[in-house]
Image (cartoon, helix red, strand yellow):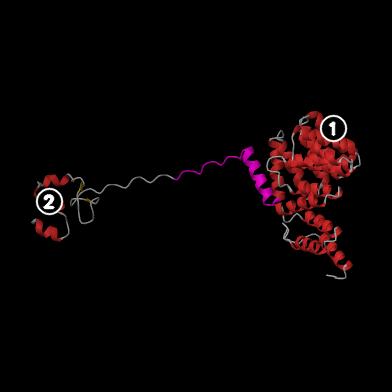
Amino acid sequence: MTRAPLLLLGLSTSCAAAYLASVAAPRASLNRLPEARPSVSIFGRDATCLAVGAAIPSPPPLRSAQPPAATTSPTAPELYERAVLLQQMRRRDESLRTFERLAELTPGDGRVWMRMMTLHKLERRWGRAEATLRRGIEALPQNALLRQALGDLCRERQRWDEARAHFAQAARLDPQLRSVYDSWGRMEASLGRHTLAAELLQRGLELEPTARTYHALGVLQDSKLGQRDKARETLRRGLRLPDEHRNPQLLHALGKLEAAAGNAPAARAHYLAAIDAAPSFTMAHLALGKLEEGLGRYETAARVYAQGATTLQPDGGMGPVQLWQSWARMEQRRGRPL
């Protein structure tokens, strides 16, 4: 057989030559099968043409199925991350169970006890919240934050003497813990012990100045201790903190201070600045509306009341009822009921 018929069959030149050579070889050579030879064929450059009678390579052996890798128990950091995520997803029961497991694995992690206490408080399980903190304190007797948290819980339940004792113990455990002086000072202020409250708040500011504590101390100095000049300076110091120059609570407190001092222009400026910084801060609307109403600027007061009452709040609702009531009473006195 010549190459031409083989080429007509679609075989490449090299394949055809291989076939003819095998026919012409001695019969004994038929017992030795030729190897596969690569060639360029009509099927592409990478195709391999096997001479007639060539051995077909055996497929590779099948791999035996490997058993699945053994799963390992999650580490404590992984469990903590999962518990926090469940808490954020409001799956509180699952989160609490995970934290309980963590408390057994890592009883020395104060964050776990604090998270568990918070979850119980969210469900208003006050007794369990307190029991959790006491378990945490038993495991970590030197943890000042846990002791302060127990004081805060007692304060919320109006167990003043117990709260005071826990705050004092937390301060002894960590004299640099600013937050305990803030909580303790606010409690004493609410109980009418204003001088002690001011001393505690001032101690907190010496450790770490914060806008929250400056606000509490300034309001106390102005409204309870009759220290208006000192209160003005305290509130201004809060505004001078980094990124606090537009703090609406501090601006509102300064506005009330200036209004009480008879300085209406300064009060108005502070109220407007507070509204500009936080349009949904309706306490500033209410204070400004009352200021304008007291000055006989009724149309301006009506606009302020209306703006505050109809401003959308973070919860999706409208302004508080006090704004609507103040607006309605003013209009009623003017013979223009809403």
Mark 1 and mark 2: Cα distance apart in space: 102 Å
Total marks drawn? Answer: 2
Task: Residue type at mark 1: give it.
Answer: Ala
Q: Is residue 181 above or below residue 332?
A: above
Instruction: Say which residue appears at 82% left-offset and 46% top-offset.
Output: 126
Residue range highlighted in magenta: 65-91
Q: Which residue lies under the disc numbered 2?
A: 17
Label 1: element kind:
helix
Q: Please indicate whether residue 123 sits to the left or right of residue 12 in the image.
A: right
Residue 335 or residue 190, whichever sits in front: 335
Query: Residue 81's x, y, as percent?
Result: 64, 43
Query: Residue 114's x, y, as percent?
Result: 74, 40
Task: Residue type at mark 2: give it.
Answer: Ala
Instruction: Say which residue appears at 74% left-offset and 34% top-offset.
Output: 208
Q: Residue 153 is drawn in which quadrant? A: top right
Label 2 Cα neighbours within 10 Å, binned few <14 / some 14-19 / many ≥20: some
Q: Which residue lies under the disc numbered 1?
A: 168
- Residue 90 drawn in magenta: yes
Instruction: Say which residue appears at 71% left-offset and 54% top-offset.
Output: 276
